[in-house]
Amino acid sequence: MNKTHIILIHGTWCNGNVWKDFANGLNDMGLNVHTPSLRYHDLPYDEVLAKVGNVELEDYVNDIIDYALKLDNPPILLGHSLGCLIAQLVASKIKTKGMILLGPAPTGGMFAFYPTMVICFYKHFLRWGFWKKPMPPYKHAFFDYCMNEQDINLKQKLFDELVPESGRVYAQMAFPFFDKKRSAYVQFDKISCPVLIVSGTKDKMTVKEIAIKTSKKYKDVLLEIFDGADHMYESGKFKNKTLETIKSWLIEKNI
């Protein structure tokens, strides 16, 4: 019998290498783990900087769809942050066994201008032409608003591996009402698989209110809010708790 596939979709500034021990933990559950990098994110920093600025949200979504359709059975989709939005857009277009959202980014139509979230990215949006420029990783945002509860050495280690993000994607996310393609809007009624959503009380990059709003979009959903957790559910202090929560959910849903 073939193993259940699970595709891990990373978030802003990251690539597939961010999963590391977390992916190993999922593999130990008997899952066939896939860790693709979003378009260009697996290239050296300067190459990403030169290429990623104009990449669109649809490009990320279509790349994951193409990846998933090559598998021998429908996968579970696991997204982190921006990866959660991508996961939901993918799940609305292809068959999936389940969906796991860690610190979901807002979908089109959701209020997104919470103070801590604005602080994370305002420098990018103050740049002229932000909608077509790559967004470099901001150390202050990553250290104090993404990994605010983590060990300083882990913060630096992960920061050193970050790459620029697409300014086009962030324009589509932050200002969806200006996007004629409505790229960030999810057709929730087309997603019928079981959904697990994880958030944290100290997540400043995608606050728990967004996870709560997201949970209300689904019928078969479990929302878990970790007390004291920051945005990096797959790393450091919160990795094991996240893995335990996923394992329990998989067993409950018989996936």
Image (tube, rainbow, N blue to C red):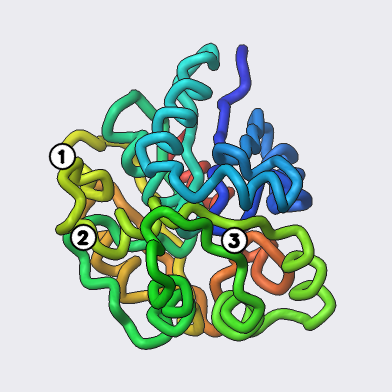
- Which residue occupies the foreground of this view, 240 or 115? 115
Q: CA distance from mark 2 to mark 3?
A: 21 Å
Neighbour tally class for label 1: few under 14, some 14-19, many 20 plus, Cα within 10 Å: few
The local secondary structure at tag 3 comes to helix
* Position above or below: 97 against 13: above
User: Helix, strand, or loop for circle 1?
Assistant: helix
Residue placed most toward the observer, 205 or 190: 205
Q: Return the x and y of residue 131 as percentages of the image width and height.
A: 37, 58
Which label number is shown at residue 160?
none
Residue 47 image position (x, y, % from top left): 69, 45
Above or below, comparing residue 38 to residue 18 in the picture: above
Q: Which residue appears at 57% of the width and 27% of the height?
A: 5
SS under mark 2? loop
Residue picked out by circle 3 = 242
Q: Residue at x 65, y 70 (%)?
A: 238
Residue 216 occupies quadrant: bottom left
Instruction: Relative to 132, say whether 64 is above or below.
Output: above
Residue wearing tag 2: 216
Give the residue type that dot 3 points to: Thr
Q: Amino acid at mark 2?
A: Lys
Q: Report the amino acid beneath label 1.
A: Asp
Q: Which residue is mark 1?
A: 189
Quadrant, the N terminus: top right
Q: Is residue 67 above or below residue 83?
A: above
Mark found first going from the N terminus, 2 or 3: 2
Mark 3 burial class by Cα count in 10 Å: few <14, some 14-19, many 20+: many
Mark 3 vs mark 1: which is more N-terminal? 1
Whichever of labels 1 and 2 marks the residue nearer the N terminus, that label is 1
Position of 47 with respect to 144 (left or right) is right
- Label 2 neighbourhood size at 10 Å, few (<14), some (14-19), many (20+)? few
